Structures are given as structure tokens and as C-alpha cells.
Amino acid sequence: MSATLRLAEQLLACQSVTPLDAGCQDIIAARLAPLGFTCESLNSGPAGERVSNLWAKRLETPENKAQAATKTIASQRPRKTVVLAGHTDVVPTGPLHTWASAPFAPSYRDGRMYARGASDMKTSIAAFVVAIEEFLAAQPDTALNIAVLLTSDEEGPAVDGTVVVCNRLRERRETIDYCIVGEPTAVARTGDMIKNGRRGSMSGKLCIQGVQGHVAYPHLANNPIHRWAPALAELVAMEWDGGNAYFQPTSWQVSNIHAGTGAGNVIPGDLVVDFNFRFSTESTPESLQQRLTRVLERHELEYDLSWTIQGMPFLTAPGPLVDAARAAIQAETGLHTELSTTGGTSDGRFLAQICPEVIELGPPNASIHKIDEYIHVADVEPLKNIYRRILEILDARERA
């Protein structure tokens, strides 16, 4: 069994359902500390729901400090920091009797390793660590600063996790130059797709006021469902933007509608609608809010509306990090990777606020959040090797 699989098994045995870390980060810190990493626990959240956050960073060693001292002043430049980021928490298992094997006891069948978190994303974390170990064994005097950021609050509210660490780093004026998030991004085979950006996400909760009454006397009531229907039809048909070369057009979706008392003979007094925008860089939260409220006003609705922005869109154009990832994938797998910004949000939205180049790169995502989540064993070592190759390419670039 490879070192990556052995470490993955250790992590997968931890029952780290959000917001629990269940010891995963202690395992990682114990592997990184002997390599010269300073490991900080930046935990956050209320008692009983405490979120575990690990920030581990390896700075210059005596060897590469001495090497830097031999350079001319003109050739010296600040060292770049590359971060490997991810989450140790997993989603709930669902009914245990529906699993073919225990979700927190990794098992193997037909070339696959089954466990909750196998694909999303404990195997990526194991691959991070082993890639770092192999890279530093070959390049102990690397020209890079290397860091690892882990949280146990990615699958949950995401208010006490990566965003907390990013805010702390900003306060300390610590800079990050490159970030690789280990989210499962591949479709059929590791390396066939990476995310070089994500759409923004903004949700709204709309309460339309009416007047409750008896269904037999509609003239004495004001049915908010009926009042809402024409506005809904207009919003569904609206083209919010056309997208661009990197992003799909902005979409608007209603996720929940609730009205009524439960009785069949009562006109409801109000209607509550939950909806969400997934938006491209062609739109802003302000422009989308203004366009939607203009529709509500045009239909003369009485309403209350609150907004929540879960994340802004971000994009990493081809450059040092994307080029390194492409080259590493090509060298390891022979694949020409596809760049994509599709899918949901990730912690990349927080990291992009403090890091100019962020990508997501991980194994296939076909089984994530499902019963009998798995990863193909054949995808594990290539993933670790891709991470190591990216470090090698970035290191060589800094030495040039």
C-alpha cells in the first residue's frame, strides 16, 4: 500500500462530520512538524460547535538563507508562498444500513476505496502531505515557502473556517501567491478538469404580504400567491447576462416557496420565497438586486426582502499557477486538462480575496456526498504526483 493510501485511511477512519475534525488535523500536523512547519490552531466558533482550523507554514531554512545570501542584491526577490488548502469535515453519512460497508472504515472493492470523504476530500489532503514530503526530501532548500490550510467548516455554514484564517492572515499581513484547493474537480479521470474560478453566489429571502381570508370570499382577501405569479414568470424568463469566455451566464433559481396555514379553505396572508443567483463576472450583486427589485415594484407587490452574499466570483487566468498545473497534469497523465468555472461554491472564494492565483484540483467527483462514496485507487498516486510536480515546477521557476 502506498504512503498516500495509508495516510488517507487514517483520515477516513476519523468521524469528522461538520463541524468536527475528530483528530484529522492533529494527524497532519504531526506529519508536517518534522519537515520544519510551524503549526497553528486558529479555531473558531461557539462552544460545542467549535471549528478546527490548521495553518501550517514552512519558511526559509538555514540552507536556503545561506544560499540567498550569496546572491547579488539585484537578483534577490521576496519568496513566493504556495498554499495547499482543503477541509477535513465531511457531510453526514445518511442511513448506515444503505452503505455496503461502514462509512468510516475504509474498504476496497473492484479497484475502489470506499468511505465517507474518500473523494471529498480526505484523499486529496493525504496526497498534499505525501507530495510535500517527497518534494522536500528532494529539495530541502526549496525557493518556495509552503503552507497547508485545513478547516472543519467547509461542508457547513463556512463562517468559522477558511474565512477566519484568511482574515487572520490579512491582519498579520501575511501574503499568499499561489493556492491549490484539493476539491474533487475531475470528471472521469484525475487531471481531466480543474477549476480556475467559480461563479458568485447570492441568496434572497422574499416575503410577499397579502391579506388572509376565506377562499369563498376572495374579494375580502389578497392572495400573495396570485400576486406573485406574474412577477415569477417575468423573473424566470429574464436573461441576467450572457456570461463570457470563462463563465456561464448568470442563473436565477427559486429553491423554496411556502405559504398558507395548511388548511384548504384559507387564502394565505403571506408568501415566503427563497431564491439564489449564481452569477458571473458580467454582473454584480448590486446590479442583480436592482433588476430584481424593479420587477417587484413594477408588479406593485408589498414585500420584505433580505440578501445574503455567499461568495463573489473569482478567476485565475492562465499564468504561473495554471501553467504549472497544466504541465504537471500533462507530464503525469498525458491529459490536456480543461479549465472550468462550473459547479458550486468552495472555500476558494475566501482564498481568492487574499491570493491572486487560486485553482481547485482533485479527483473525480462522481460519488461525492453519495451513499458508498469512493475513489478509484488508480487515481490516488497520480494525484499525489501532480501536486508534487506543481511544487517542482514553481520551485524551478523561482530559481530561474
Image: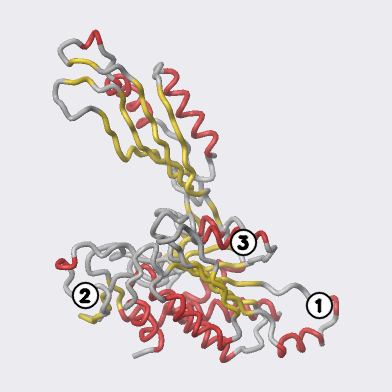
User: Label for residue 102?
Assistant: 2
In the image: residue 120, left or right of residue 167? left
| Front position among marks 2 and 1 | 2
Marks 3/1: CA–CA distance: 31 Å
Category of crowding for the residue at label 2, using alpha-carbon neighbours closer than 10 angstroms: few (below 14), some (14–19), many (at least 20): some
Local secondary structure at mark 3: helix
Tell me if residue 285 comes above or below residue 177 in the rendering: above
Residue 286 appearing in the image:
yes
Q: Earlier in the sequence, mark 3 or mark 1?
A: 1
In the rendering, at what x and y percent does residue 76 appear? 79, 77
Within the image, what quadrant is residue 15 found in? Answer: bottom left
3 or 1: mark nearer the eye = 3
Q: Residue at x 35, y 32 (%)?
A: 236
Neighbour class for label 1 at 10 Å: few (<14), some, many (≥20)?
Answer: few
CB under 8 Å between callouts 2 and 1? no
Element under disc 2: loop
Disc 3 marks which residue?
Answer: 168
Q: If the image is split into quadrants, where does the N terminus sit?
A: bottom left
